Amino acid sequence: MDFYAIQKEVYEIAYKNGWYDTDIKPSFGEFIAGCHLELSEAFQEYRNQSAATKIENELADVVIRIMGYCYRMGFELEKSILRKNEYNRTRPFKHGGKRLWELEDYLK
């Protein structure tokens, strides 16, 4: 099964299960919140020291939400991933200089 067919299938399952129950496209905010929810569930499984499969399942839910939303919006996610990956090959090491700051960094 190709990537776009998987996108279509996950969308159709979500639609059948009531996640896209109208002809109105979900707002981008609702989509992002749903992804955040799934990521938070994965983090909770990690904090609970759950089996790796529980964490993997929550991460899979994030990907499924993204694939379904992209299909609904007409985005060809595979092409976007390949295009972005090619661009990322050209970027320098740790481009942008951004890093996650620890609380201790702010208290100095």
Image: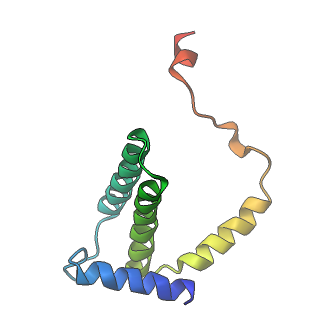
- In the rendered image, residue 79, in percent from the top left (x then y), is placed at 61, 79
Q: Viewer-proximal residue, 73 or 45?
A: 45
Q: Is residue 29 left or right of residue 95?
A: left
**Where the N terminus falls, by quadrant?**
bottom right
Q: Is residue 51 above or below residue 100?
A: below
Q: What residue is rendered at 73% in x and 64% in y?
A: 87
Q: How is the image coloured?
A: rainbow
**Residue at image coords 39%, 73%:** 69
Q: Quadrant of the C terminus?
A: top right
Who is closer to the viewer here, 62 or 84? 62
Residue 87 shown left or right of residue 28 in the figure: right
Q: Residue at x 46, y 59 (%)?
A: 53
Q: Toward which corner of the image does residue 94 lie, by quadrant?
A: top right
Q: Is residue 47 left or right of residue 97?
A: left
Q: Position of residue 20 (x, y in %)?
A: 25, 77
**Residue located 47% across and 59% down the image:** 56
Work out whether 108 lies above or below 11. above
Res 43 quadrant in image: top left
Q: Quadrant of residue 105?
A: top right
